[in-house]
Amino acid sequence: MAIETIEWEDGRIKLIDQTLLPNEFKQIYCDDLPTIWEAIKSLRVRGAPAIGIAGALGAVIGIWNSTANTYEAFGAELKSATDYLATSRPTAVNLFWALDRMTRTAEENKHLPIPELKETLLAEAQDIIEEDKAMCRAIGQHGMALLNENDTILTHCNAGGLATSDYGTALAVMFSANEAGKQIQVYADETRPLLQGARLTTWELMQAGIDVTLICDNMAAQVMKEGKIQCVIVGADRIAANGDTANKIGTYNVAILAQVHEIPFYVAAPTSTIDFALSTGEEIPIEQRSAEEVTEGFGRLTAPKGVKVYSPAFDVTPASFVTAIITEKGVAHPPFTDSLGALQEE
Ligand code: MRU
């Protein structure tokens, strides 16, 4: 994308407000912690890698105007900022990965004068953005080798440029194949309740000139049965060491359907999305969202007022449903404990 999903501009965070897409393209500024926290919570900025970047830049916002003159006081301000940002969304591990990295950077550079330490932290956040861009490109290159001429891919939610610094993870594979001249088509699940597939994925693919067809989530089985899909590619919010994968609610449904129809199911994610501290997906915290997102997501009541609602934002697809995990370091195959472990060693 020519326009950055999220960036630093003159002491503020500038980001595309994704809640308004595709009707309105608007960039907003966040110059204090509550504003960036709210932007993450309400999905103005969303997608695991982009949430990580928002966390890193948010940590900078937390200390940018600090008047502390000892490292102890400065470190306490940074800790209070990172602790607060960590409460925004629980599932995408990239947030915690980025916040830890910012804390480590501060600790490693605590001998620096505070003004230089601030610049060092900003440079670290910028590095996270640049590394993310490179990882997305590499995921695209590794993943496109899995696609054949004329394949049609099903994807769920949005794992595109909007969900990362640029180019995406699952969509990176499609962008790379398209740029290499491979003919591909895509079916995009609408992705209830917040319609990231309908609003964002189709928008990105259409801009790239890729043939995309929108379906409601409950149409995937029929579309697969009709033989229209050659593989599924989705992103991830957190992958356990054994390959169990948390992604947008409904991903597990798609994985089951893919297995029944003998269609490969690929997960595309940077290694920063792998949580090696968790041996299985059982331990992944699942975010619960408000009832209103289901009953009146886009301003119109679509269920009786007061109806009971259950709204987990993510599900965990067991590793046994995953054909391969496409990372920036290469494609990992089952058994994932071994193949992901080997990637960690690199
Ligand atoms: O709730 P969201 O929109 O942040 O959920 C996003 C997803 O589930 C994506 O598939 C995932 O974060 C991967 S983004 C490259």
Image (cartoon, rainbow, N blue to C red):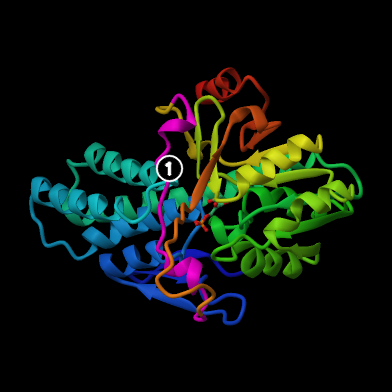
- The question of residue 109 being in magenta is answered with no
Which amino acid, mark 1?
Val
Nearer to the camera, 175 or 224: 224
Q: Which residue does the image show at 55% across and 51% down from the upper left? A: 248
* Quadrant of residue 212 within the rendered picture: bottom right
Q: Is residue 66 above or below residue 297?
A: above
Mark 1 Cα shell of 10 Å, populated few (<14), some (14-19), many (≥20): many
> Where the C terminus falls, by quadrant?
top right
Where does the image place residue 252, in percent across and percent down from the top left? 61, 42
Q: Is residue 264 visible?
A: no
Please give left or right for residue 69 compared with residue 301 in the image. left
- In front here: 106 or 120? 106
Q: Which residues are magenta?
A: 279-300
Answer whether residue 15 is visible to the viewer in this image: yes
* Residue of label 1: 93
**Residue 58's spot in the image, x, y percent?**
32, 59
Q: Does residue 8 lie above or below 313 as drawn? A: below
The verdict on residue 291 being magenta is yes
Spot occupied by residue 258 in the image (x, y as percentages of width and height): 75, 40
Disc 1 element:
helix
Decide which of 288, 178 is in the foreground and name it: 288
Lateral position of residue 21 relative to residue 266, left or right: left
Identified at 52% across, 44% down, the residue is 315
Q: Main secondary structure of the magenta part?
A: loop
Above or below residue 220? Residue 290 is below
For the point 70% across and 52% down, which residue is it? Answer: 155
| 262 relative to 140 in the view: left or right | right
The x, y position of residue 158, in whole percent, is 61, 57
Would you place residue 142 above or below residue 81 in this image? above
